[in-house]
Image (cartoon, helix red, strand yellow):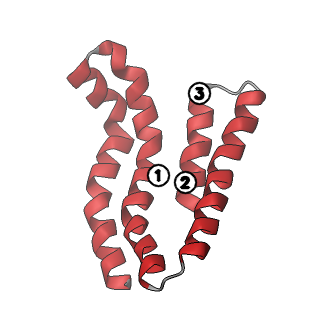
């Protein structure tokens, strides 16, 4: 499993790094100036993309081990971990970039 993890991380590293460092420029170049803000969001979410791509296949282990109840609990907990900070920051009137940073960090940690 560790070998698979490192292979997946190496596959995800380059696209995630490109989006993280050049997302705003790429989006504005490819889609036009109106998409600069979307590129900023994509840059922030690239961190979560990296971890999600690397770790997501391991969730299938729950199915193999027939631990669906544990997987259901984990996914419910993950929803809370990701969306509770988003709701709190939105309630406190944080800007969209800060909320997306929060979401990206929570997805990465979960």
27 w.r.t. 49: above or below: above
Whole-percent x and y of residue 47?
45, 51
Q: Which residue is mark 2?
A: 107
Sequence-first tag of 1 and 2: 1
Q: Using the image, tell me which numbered label, if any, was put on residue 84.
A: none
Q: CA distance from mark 1 to mark 2?
A: 6 Å
Percent position of residue 58, x then y: 42, 74
Question: In terms of image quadrants, where is residue 93?
Answer: top right
Whether residue 110 is visible:
no
Rendered position, 76 above or below 94:
below
Contact flag, marks 1 and 3 (Cβ < 8 Å): no
Q: Looking at the image, do the residues carrying marks 1 and 2 touch, with CB atoms under 8 Å apart?
A: yes
- Counting residues from the start of the chain, the first of labels 2 and 3 encountered is 3
Say what secondary structure mark 1 lies in. helix
Residue drawn at point x = 29 percent, y = 27 percent = 27
Q: Which residue is mark 3?
A: 96
Label located before the other in sequence (1 or 3): 1
Regarding mark 3 in the picture, which secondary structure is present there? Answer: helix
User: Position of 22 compared to 49: left or right?
Assistant: left
Which dot marks residue 48? 1
Do the residues bearing badges 2 and 3 touch, measured as CB atoms within 8 Å?
A: no
Q: Is residue 84 above or below residue 87?
A: below
Residue at point 66%, 39% (across, down): 86
Quadrant (top left/top right/bottom left/bottom right) for the N terminus: bottom left
């Amino acid at each position: 499993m560790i070998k698979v993890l490192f292979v997946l991380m190496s596959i995800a590293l380059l696209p995630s790094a490109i989006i993280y460092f050049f997302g705003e420029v790429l989006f504005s170049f490819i889609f036009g100036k109106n998409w600069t803000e979307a590129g900023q969001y994509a840059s922030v979410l690239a961190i979560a993309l990296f971890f999600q791509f690397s770790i997501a296949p391991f969730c299938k282990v729950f199915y193999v081990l027939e631990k669906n109840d544990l997987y259901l609990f984990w996914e419910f907990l993950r929803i809370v971990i990701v969306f509770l900070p988003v709701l709190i920051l939105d309630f406190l009137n944080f800007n969209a970039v800060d909320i997306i940073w929060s979401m990206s960090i929570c997805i990465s940690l979960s």
